[in-house]
């Protein structure tokens, strides 16, 4: 199984080597300027994190993620195609059934950051909110990405761990671990051909 982690904040040699050992072959990086294939068939994809709804627009060169801070902006962003609506512990409560309904059919997706699961005092509430968000998105047919948001190699998540999370949250495989393929089919399908070459 080829793994993907579409938001890794740290691109140090140690983190990239650890990702490769975990069979993560596709990495989204805010530090990458172009889609670049590097040694051992690892592909870096440029990511941009947006925080201003008024400047938000999709790009064919950079995979855009928007982190809303309020419900109104989350709803507005949900109507824009080919972007991620990014949720972490700070804003996961904004991911509700209405948000999922607004995003239906817009060729955008929900991205949930796993880093906050590693913080003890946040994890229980965050897990409950994650499950709720994932189930709303799943019922609405919206792709859901689980990204590490890793700031060092110790915060990476093995793809097999994601399979376990997927089975616990959804009950079957593929919805969370393979949704990145659907995202790239809609955003830039040529990247998928780079993985197989």
Image (cartoon, helix red, strand yellow):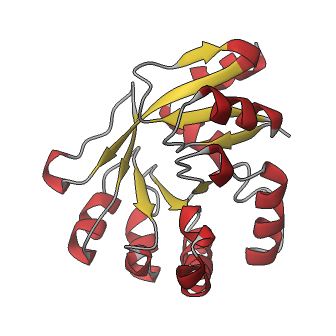
**Picture quadrant of residue 43:** top right
- Residue 58 sits above or below residue 125 on the image: above
Q: Quadrant of the N terminus?
A: top right
From the viewer's perspective, is 19 left or right of 68? Answer: right
Q: Residue at x 42, y 29 (%)?
A: 31
**Picture quadrant of residue 90:** bottom left
Q: Position of residue 60 (x, y in %)?
A: 39, 27
Q: Nearer the viewer, residue 99 or 25?
A: 25
Is residue 73 visible in the rendered image? The answer is yes
Outermost residue, left direction?
A: 54
- Residue 187 sits above or below residue 172 on the image: above
Q: Position of residue 92 (x, y in %)?
A: 44, 75
Q: Residue at x 44, y 25 (%)?
A: 32
Q: Residue at x 70, y 13 (%)?
A: 39
- Residue 80 sits above or below residue 91 on the image: above
Q: Residue at x 57, y 73 (%)?
A: 119
Q: Position of residue 160 (x, y in %)?
A: 84, 54
- Residue 123 sits above or below residue 107 on the image: below
Q: How many marks?
A: 0
Is residue 173 visible in the rendered image? The answer is no
Q: Quadrant of the C terminus?
A: top right
Q: Nearer the viewer, residue 80 or 95?
A: 95
**Picture quadrant of residue 12:** top right
């Amino acid at each position: 199984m080829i793994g993907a982690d579409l938001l890794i904040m740290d691109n140090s040699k140690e983190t990239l080597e650890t990702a490769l050992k975990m069979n993560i072959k596709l990495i989204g990086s805010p530090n990458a300027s172009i889609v670049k294939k590097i040694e051992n068939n690892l592909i870096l994809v440029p990511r941009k994190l947006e925080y201003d709804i008024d400047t938000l627009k999709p790009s064919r060169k950079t995979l855009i993620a928007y982190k809303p801070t309020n419900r109104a902006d989350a709803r507005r962003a949900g109507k824009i195609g080919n972007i991620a609506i990014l949720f972490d512990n700070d804003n996961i409560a904004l991911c509700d059934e209405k948000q999922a309904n607004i995003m239906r059919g817009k060729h955008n997706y929900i991205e949930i950051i796993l880093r906050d699961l590693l913080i003890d005092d946040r994890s229980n509430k965050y897990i409950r909110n994650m499950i709720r968000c994932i189930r709303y998105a799943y019922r609405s047919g919206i792709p859901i990405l689980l990204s590490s948001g890793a700031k060092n190699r110790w915060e990476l998540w093995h793809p097999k761990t994601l399979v376990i999370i997927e089975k616990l949250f959804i009950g079957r495989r593929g919805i969370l671990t393979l949704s990145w393929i659907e995202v790239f089919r809609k955003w830039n399908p040529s990247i998928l051909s780079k993985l197989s070459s």
